[in-house]
Image (cartoon, rainbow, N blue to C red):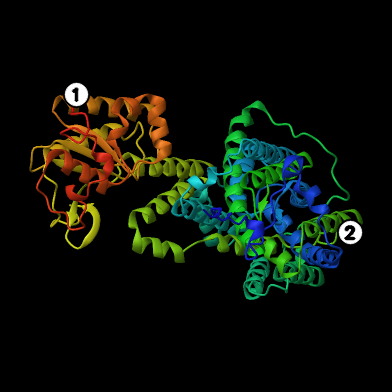
């Protein structure tokens, strides 16, 4: 006899020339991917990273200041968060391309905590923002270390659209007074909107400030599609020059940024009162959730584009480390930026050295020229924030969702209304609660079906969708389209009993088509045990078809597999039907020739009933 040919060895990803992905670092390098990247750095990238970092600075400065002001903290906090957040992420973040910093998606969350608690005290506002960064950073690091990077995937797309649209609307309304050149007092979107309208009707609008703000907004909008022209920088510089040349601050009362502190902050732990602890903890949780949701989506997008492999857990650690460092250096919470990352990419960035160069350049400007933007009008900063908030609003995909799944559209609207009415933090809590309910509902009230044969169609199908289906006399084939767990175990039992009661013939076997059942817990296992005993008393055998091996393993741990017996588990529904026909000599024609004449050998165990224990036997 010739030697047998060994089976082919499957190709690993690295052996397949069509699949070229960067491998995730292992060991200690997994936790500090920045150090690991140094060993793979190419000298040819250096020029690209330096030039991209300098170009990125043009956006980091105005955006960092604008989001800090919009968040209710001193403008310098935005630059501190930008500098130290980028440096920390370069060391701990896994993505080669992401740019982190203050972001419009976090503005409403930070403002919702800082504004009412700081009572106008800038030092207290800095401490609160810093503590929010520490809390959200700590949560991200702990969750990433515990490998909980999947958490944000529990929020469905409509729910994310809902709370993000609510946040965008909240940010937009909060910036309207600054855009019109005045200030209002109010907490929450509805109250702020009412106060804004009242101030406009009272004639509080500063025409010069409004013109600068609208001009900034228009210029950013016109240049948004240009990946190489820094529209934000040009708009901010133009507004600053106009204010300086025409002396608008003195002549027309246009509010300006003022001088920034020279130098860099010392490391310090922010201190807050015990009364502020609960809202800061809740706010930090919401910020951690939103920031990681945004960061993970953006990270996966660029990883796919660059052919990289991103560890979601390490991404969470990197984001957390960046927030921790930002909080220790008088910064505010940060996230990945959908506006600054494309700037770095368009400028030719290759690695996180781009962010390091940008951070160092911003730091150098604070050391050498802190008064460079002292005449920057706050109306222009409001324009920057509003332009970014508008990009957060999702309409087109919600229209699609409205067409194809209307109830999910209304879930999104509820989340939006929750943020608008109750505020950003409670709104996020409402979104999480809705997400949990949505997740449980799908498993709590799943679809189930009695199956029959349809002439000319392969397999066994839902008799509700195929009324012409033929049932096997004495056999009920029942399919359960969900995992079996505590919340749906009783419903499973009720639907099984309903299926048995609705059978047109006396039932001998009940076979559960268990392919969709991906898991089972103790409660549902006990329900199966009770159901088996109930059916046994009625002379009905309970069997399973197409059950997955991991689910069988759980039944073995629970002691049910041995109790039922291996003969009650069938590889396919067709085998179950064939064995039933052989065991009961039922005269039933199967158009795919899977009747008793072609029953599997496993059915022939040498007894009159195919070797299966009679129910109750």
Q: Is residue 569 above or below residue 460?
A: above
Question: In this orientation, does residue 205 appear?
Answer: no
Give the Cα separation between the discs numbered 1 and 2. Answer: 90 Å
Instruction: Report the residue marked by disc 1.
Output: 617
Question: In this orientation, does residue 352 appear?
Answer: yes
Q: Quadrant of residue 350?
A: bottom right
Instruction: Report the residue marked by disc 2.
Output: 369
The residue furthest front is 1
Check disc 2: other Cα within 10 Å, few if <14, some if 14-19, many if 20+.
some
Residue 564, horizontal then vertical, whole percent: 29, 28
Mark sitting earlier along the chain (1/2)? 2
Q: Nearer the viewer, residue 422 or 613?
A: 613
Residue 261, horizontal then vertical, whole percent: 85, 50
Q: Nearer the viewer, mark 1 or mark 2?
A: 1
Number of marks drawn: 2
Q: Is residue 340 above or below residue 433?
A: below
- Quarter of the image with the C terminus in it: top left
At x 72% / y 49%, what residue is drawn? 93
Please give the label number shown on residue 428. none
Check disc 1: other Cα within 10 Å, few if <14, some if 14-19, many if 20+.
few
């Amino acid at each position: 006899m010739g030697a047998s040919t060994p089976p082919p060895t499957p190709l690993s990803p690295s052996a397949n020339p069509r699949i070229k992905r960067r491998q995730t670092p292992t060991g200690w390098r997994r936790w500090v991917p920045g150090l690991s990247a140094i060993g793979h750095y190419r000298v040819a990238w250096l020029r690209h990273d330096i030039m991209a970092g300098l170009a990125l600075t043009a956006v980091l400065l105005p955006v960092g200041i604008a989001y800090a002001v919009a968040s209710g903290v001193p403008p310098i906090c935005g630059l501190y968060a930008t500098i130290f957040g980028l440096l920390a992420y370069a060391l701990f973040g896994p993505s080669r391309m992401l740019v982190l910093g203050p972001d419009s998606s976090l503005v409403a969350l930070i403002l919702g905590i800082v504004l009412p608690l700081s009572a106008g005290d800038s030092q207290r506002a800095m401490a609160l923002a810093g503590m929010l960064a520490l809390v959200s950073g700590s949560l991200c690091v702990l969750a990433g270390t515990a490998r909980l990077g999947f958490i944000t995937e529990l929020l469905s797309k409509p729910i994310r659209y809902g709370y993000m649209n609510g946040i965008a609307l909240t940010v937009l309304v909060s910036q309207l007074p600054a855009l019109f050149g005045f200030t209002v007092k109010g907490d929450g979107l509805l109250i702020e909107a009412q106060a804004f309208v009242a101030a406009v009707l009272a004639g509080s609008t500063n025409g010069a400030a409004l013109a600068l703000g609208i001009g900034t907004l228009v210029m950013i909008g016109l240049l948004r599609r240009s990946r190489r022209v820094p529209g934000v920088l040009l708009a901010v510089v133009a507004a600053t020059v106009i204010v300086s040349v025409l002396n608008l601050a003195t002549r027309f009362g246009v509010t300006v940024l003022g001088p920034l502190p020279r130098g860099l902050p010392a490391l310090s732990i922010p201190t807050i009162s015990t009364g502020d602890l609960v809202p800061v903890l809740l706010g930090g949780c919401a910020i951690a959730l939103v920031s990681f949701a945004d960061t993970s989506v953006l990270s996966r997008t660029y990883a796919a584009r660059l052919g990289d492999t991103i560890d979601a857990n390490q991404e969470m650690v990197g984001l957390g480390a960046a927030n921790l460092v930002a909080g220790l250096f008088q910064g505010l919470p940060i996230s990945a930026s959908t506006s600054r990352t494309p700037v770095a990419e368009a400028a030719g960035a290759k690695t996180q050295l781009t962010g390091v160069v940008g951070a160092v350049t911003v730091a150098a400007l604070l050391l050498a020229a802190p008064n460079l933007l002292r005449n920057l009008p706050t109306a222009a900063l409001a324009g920057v924030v509003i332009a970014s908030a508008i990009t957060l609003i999702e309409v087109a995909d919600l229209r699609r969702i409205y067409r194809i799944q209307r109830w999910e559209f209304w879930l999104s609207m509820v989340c939006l209304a929750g943020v608008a009415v109750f505020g950003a933090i409670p709104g996020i809590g409402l979104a999480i609660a809705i997400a949990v309910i949505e997740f449980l509902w799908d498993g709590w009230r799943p679809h189930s079906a009695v199956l029959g044969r349809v002439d000319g169609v392969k397999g066994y199908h839902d008799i509700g969708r195929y009324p012409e289906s033929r049932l096997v006399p004495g056999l009920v084939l029942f399919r359960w389209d969900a995992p079996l767990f505590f919340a749906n175990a009783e419903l499973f039992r009720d639907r099984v009993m309903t299926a048995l009661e609705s059978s047109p013939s006396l039932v001998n076997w009940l076979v559960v088509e268990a392919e969709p059942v991906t898991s089972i817990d103790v409660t549902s296992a006990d329900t199966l045990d009770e159901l088996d005993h109930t059916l046994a008393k009625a002379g009905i055998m309970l069997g399973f078809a197409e059950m997955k091996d991991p689910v069988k393993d759980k039944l073995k741990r629970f002691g049910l597999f041995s109790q039922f017996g291996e003969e009650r588990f069938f590889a396919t529904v067709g085998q179950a039907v064939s064995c039933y026909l052989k065991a009961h000599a039922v005269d039933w024609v199967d158009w795919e020739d899977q009747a008793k004449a072609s029953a599997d050998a496993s059915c022939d165990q040498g007894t009159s009933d195919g070797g299966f224990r009679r129910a109750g036997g």
